[in-house]
Image (tube, coloured by chain):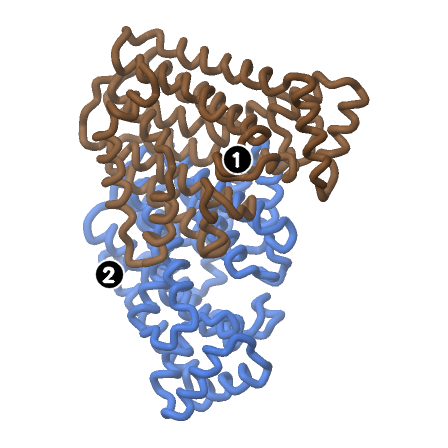
Chain colours: A brown, B blue
Amino acid sequence: MRIEAVWKTFHGDLDRVEEEIRHHLHSDAAIIPEVGGYLLEGGGKRVRPLMALLSARLCGYQRESLYTLAAIVEYLHTASLLHDDVVDMAQLRRGHAAANSIWGNQVCGLVGDYFYAMALHLAVAEDSLEIMEILSAATAYMVKGELLQMAHTKDVKTDREQYEGIITCKTANLMAAACALPAVAAGVEGEMKEGLRAFGRHLGIAFQMVDDTLDYVAEEERLGKLVGKDLMEGKVTLPLILLLQHASAADRARVEEVILKDNLEPHDLQEVMLLLGRYDILAACLEVSGDHVRQAKEALAPFPDSEARAACFALADYVIERDL
Amino acid sequence: MRIEAVWKTFHGDLDRVEEEIRHHLHSDAAIIPEVGGYLLEGGGKRVRPLMALLSARLCGYQRESLYTLAAIVEYLHTASLLHDDVVDMAQLRRGHAAANSIWGNQVCGLVGDYFYAMALHLAVAEDSLEIMEILSAATAYMVKGELLQMAHTKDVKTDREQYEGIITCKTANLMAAACALPAVAAGVEGEMKEGLRAFGRHLGIAFQMVDDTLDYVAEEERLGKLVGKDLMEGKVTLPLILLLQHASAADRARVEEVILKDNLEPHDLQEVMLLLGRYDILAACLEVSGDHVRQAKEALAPFPDSEARAACFALADYVIERDL
């Protein structure tokens, strides 16, 4: 199965998730649906809701509340995007003007807060403390991941373990939650539940690694954000970590110098891009993320072969194939 | 009983709450205890934890988790303070430099997020979906209150009902939650639980009304913030609403003009202060907030007279007597 077939298979379910997302946007504070609608209808791929739908299919879970759970995860993700943009002072998001450049950091900060709180409030109706535990922990971790990332700004000593810790917090835990929630709602326990959680976590790690790699590859138009943005912001992600690890002493010194610079000039980025090519770093990044995709697939071993499991595998493959 | 006696009576319990607050500040993201410690040890009066302690005493609730509940409420309050300062771009908080002026809006925004999520995560251990419901709803309302307030910036048509709606969201709901939580934990139901919730809500409304009134009264050193700050920020609160309601057409036009001005000059504020005096508005504000204090006390009718109830009354009286 290929990813196109997965989207097609879950098209109807994803439409139901959209309805659910729109439904809970209503508020007498008009700015909430305004900002929320802009962001939620701004072309997000709904990877996290899809993960929840896939997990539910594997668990044989078909109750209505599945759509609410999927919407809740997307709300939490949207809240984190709003706050990321505020933190990054972003100008672009998915090729459109970032919400904070339209409504300002203050409004976007508060609407992000609202989505966090509203999503958790919505989850109470699921009548499960374990669901509340998973969601509130995932939210706390996402934020902690951002704070850890800021603490490692321009930190040329950031190692792979620290990096994986950061991206597990900021990205992978929510994806793990997306996969675990339907299992909890379905009453699926033990190695199946843990398998789904591990599938989401490894996929999330791979997803963020590919994202961080694409930062040094993608065409501006294709990804809707600038090339080398992480470098400019002093974010030391997988490509730089592997480059610093593999480069000669002289090249490493030069890369560290660029990372520590306050105002990058075009030739600084070009030089780093050249070194990434010389040491074949992007292929190395793909290998590392591919390993997490492999682990994600292995985590589904407790489930017998099925269309749903094949769809999970297709999603896993897509994570490293997209746009590269 | 006077407020001093209340603080004295609950001194030991409040120390336990402090321990609990400090205990949950620990994190491997070092910035969290750093910012959190600054704010949480920055001289907050712990009115909300005190409300939780008073409510617990009325309900005969003595379990350890009371201190956690009180700490959770203070964490949510602290998160909202952090985000308020970001929204306000505050320079001062309680007479000290506002956290955002030290660590920047980005860090303070994220640490605020963390406190919201961590507080809700902490609450899961209380093993009650009703507690999760109350806390997540109070959080969502707090944020919505801020957004509604922003939507009414420089809105000279803001009426009392809208104003009370805003302050109920942004201030009173969390105080209502502080009072309701121990009742829920104690298994107290019916008119006693609702009475405690109403006590907190009315006290919260009165508290915010007095705060908004003090904005036109307080000495800079005493309250640690500037006089007329709300006017400068275009916040139309109780004093302005009552002034616009009672003033002559000419005076009203002048006040509206000042509210709508972008850069206030000292004489603009002086003029408004003069009119507030001429129409005896601050006394009128005290009357309105006093009415909510009366309703707060009435809400405790289901409880027999006791030291705890007397302490609640003392706290209620303190709310309108402080610094005025």
For label 2, count other residues whose C-alpha is less than 10 Å away and answer few (under 14), some (14-19) or many (20+).
some
Q: Residue type at mark 2: give it.
A: Ala
Name the disc covering residue A144, or none.
1
Image position of A85 (left or right of B292): right
Mark 2 chain: B
In x, y percent, where is residue A67?
24, 33
A226 or B316: nearer the viewer: A226
The residue that appears at 56% across and 68% down in the rendered structure is B223
**Regarding mark 1 in the picture, which secondary structure is present there?**
helix
A275 or A105: nearer the viewer: A275
The residue that appears at 52% across and 18% down in the rendered structure is A289
Q: Image quadrant for the N terminus of chain B? A: bottom left
The residue that appears at 27% across and 30% down in the rendered structure is A128
Mark 1 chain: A
Q: Which residue is mark 2?
A: B301
Q: Is residue B319 above or below residue B157?
A: above
Q: Is residue B17 visible?
A: no
Q: Residue type at mark 1: give it.
A: Lys
In x, y percent, where is residue B182?
33, 45
Q: Are marks 2 and 1 on the same chain?
A: no
